[in-house]
Image (cartoon, helix red, strand yellow):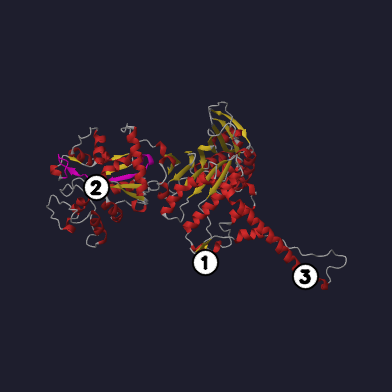
Amino acid sequence: MHIEKIEIRNFRLLKNSKISLTSTKTLFVGRNNTGKTSVMNAFSLIANGTKRLRFEDYPLSCRVVLYKQVERYFLGETNIKDLYQNIDITSFIIDVDYGNVEEDESLGRLSNFIIDLDENISLAKIKCSYEISTNLEVILEELKGQYEELIVNTDCFLVIQQLVKENFHLFFELKVYALNPTDLNDTQLRNIEDVKGLFALRIISAERNLGETQENEHQENPLASVLSSLFNTELSKAKMEIQPAIRGLKKVISTTKYDLQDNISNHMNDIVESMLQFGYPSGEDLKLKANTDLDIENSIISGTELTYVSHDNLEALPGTHNGLGYKNLIKISLILQDYIRSLNNDETRIPILFIEEPEAHMHPQLQTTFISYLENFLKDNTSHSIQTIVTTHSSHIANAVPFEQVRYFRKHLNNIKCKNLVDFKQDEAISNEDKRRENIDFLQKYINLSHCDLYFCDKAILVEGASERLLIADMINKCYQKGLFNQQRPSLQSQYYTIIEVGGTYAFRFFDFLNFLEIPTLVITDIDYVNSEGKACRKEESVRSSNGTINRWCRSVYEIPENKVSIEKILEMAETKELLIDNKIKLTYQGKENNMFPRSFEEAILNVNRNIYDINDEEASHEYDPSKLSKTDFAIRMLVDENYRNYNIPSYIETGLVWLSSQK
């Protein structure tokens, strides 16, 4: 059994979001404040059967409607029936797939939510809805009296806002339903206890105490909870490999405990006897006897911690001397072991594991290793199929996971969209399925190898090569210093942009994916003039461009067949700004500037910085020779050499960066 999908309405930023999950591991990626943690909190409400909705979890837009409806009720402009219809409610619909359950296996509490009669359907739908309280009319009548007293000297809206906030916990109450997947109008009310016992939810939140500071020295150490569970677990329910160790440990503790208790009690009795000379107890009083009850188990639990020993086992260092990344990994591992142990004690519930931002303090390689082996770790340690959901801001984790397991969260003005990368549709012109698969494989491998931040950026810049990658950030700062971003706040230099080096040959492969992710993107590429023989040349001898991205774009704009894209059409396209923008992507490349037609990024820089490079203003062309100075050295010299620091930016790049900065 596993959760196939959850629909969330009116919970924090999730106004109307549908999130599908894989049966094994699902990765939530996206920028901050895009609702990833909110999904985790929603599951917590459901699994715990939380009866009341918190004011902080009710969306801002829904609050405005609620305030207005309450005000209208107080003024007699609406009745309770209409008010019920107009207030937005928070609800969650969970689809549980039980198709892999054998006929002789128990469905546990899930059977309470299966109400269809179709044997071919193996889907249960559960609805948890925070509906308006049945006694809301009574509550509002009580609040109305307070409202009429308070509005005498206070703004009406502020009074309503405060009254609603203070009494919000009374406005809504949890109702649980079983839905018929073949007929959603067919519903049956269920007890809250039915959903409380349905899921075995464990959340490993990002706020993990690693016991690193003085303030944390009295808090429970990482081993304490695990040892506590060992002492409190029946021996038969522990893993076979550790049963002898547990049995031996308990025996040592019992023997030691009784010996110590007897020893200490004898000494304490001597102390009690010495009290007789003070006249207590008298003949009428009961006799005193000292009995010492030692809590050795808790002493061991609280006093056992991880230390690090030298290779010869002769010296040890405290746990605080090891890196936080490894401590984080150890803590997660111990929590996972404890979760697995708890599952072995309950076979009927559906396991759901949330791990929030596991990358904290881990170096990149450790992050990649962790996410790659998490699934295998769980399989090796339990027979349960644990559905795992990981949220992350790490490109190293995100890029190590197949597209099929990634869910991309993106914030829009009034809602959060969760995109399943399985739904990514490529250019319809690619009719061959093998070609589509090849393109997806290319994207997956490139993103993995380059560790690019597409999932977490505000905007993207695709560049031709190393020179652009080194200089573009500096060019963005120059545009800002020149005031070209029109005082936009925040402008491009303050936004989170990612620069991806893809070359003119491969940039087009990203277009459909970037549009799917809805990321504003600037593509900076080279016109690359070639003659009829396909060799590099000046504009005067050229017949076409060797740049695959420009050629594809031009074919699409003018609807002309392959190999018919002339250099004239490409230069004509560059003169019309609208033709170089498609959805959220803008293409930019060299055109005519200073009576010259540069063919590359380096030549374009030479052309607009003739004074720096001692180039005659009358010279119609000046070729860049990479054999004299490599492209990387060319770019680095411009960044570090004071003689080149005040360079000018080619107009095609400047125009493109200004456009990208203006995109919302």
- Say the numbered circle drawn on residue 270: 3
Q: Is residue 361 magenta?
A: no
Task: Tell me the SS state at disc 2.
Answer: helix
Q: Determine if residue 173 is in view.
A: no
What's under tag 3, amino acid-wise?
A: Asp
Q: Are marks 2 and 3 in contact (CB under 8 Å)?
A: no
Sooner in the amino-acid sequence: mark 3 or mark 1: 3
Camera-near label (3 vs 1) is 1
- Say the numbered circle drawn on residue 473: none
Residue 143 is situated, as x and y percent measured from the top left of the image, at: 62, 44
Camera-near label (2 vs 1) is 1
Q: Are marks 3 and 1 in contact (CB under 8 Å)?
A: no
Task: Tell me the SS state at disc 1.
Answer: loop
Q: What residue lies at 75% left-to-right and 63% top-to-bottom?
A: 291
130 on left or right of 25: right
Residue sitting at the far bottom: 277
Residue sitting at the far top: 118
What's under tag 2, amino acid-wise?
A: Tyr
If the image is split into quadrants, where does the N terminus sit?
Answer: top right
If the image is split into quadrants, where does the C terminus sit?
Answer: top left
Front position in the image: 106 or 56: 106
Q: What are the residue bounds of the magenta stretch?
A: 513-536
| Badge 3: residue crowd in 10 Å (few <14, some 14–19, many ≥20) | few
- Say the numbered circle drawn on residue 652: 2
| Measured Cα–Cα span from mark 3 to mark 1 | 42 Å
Which residue bears the numbered disc 1?
314
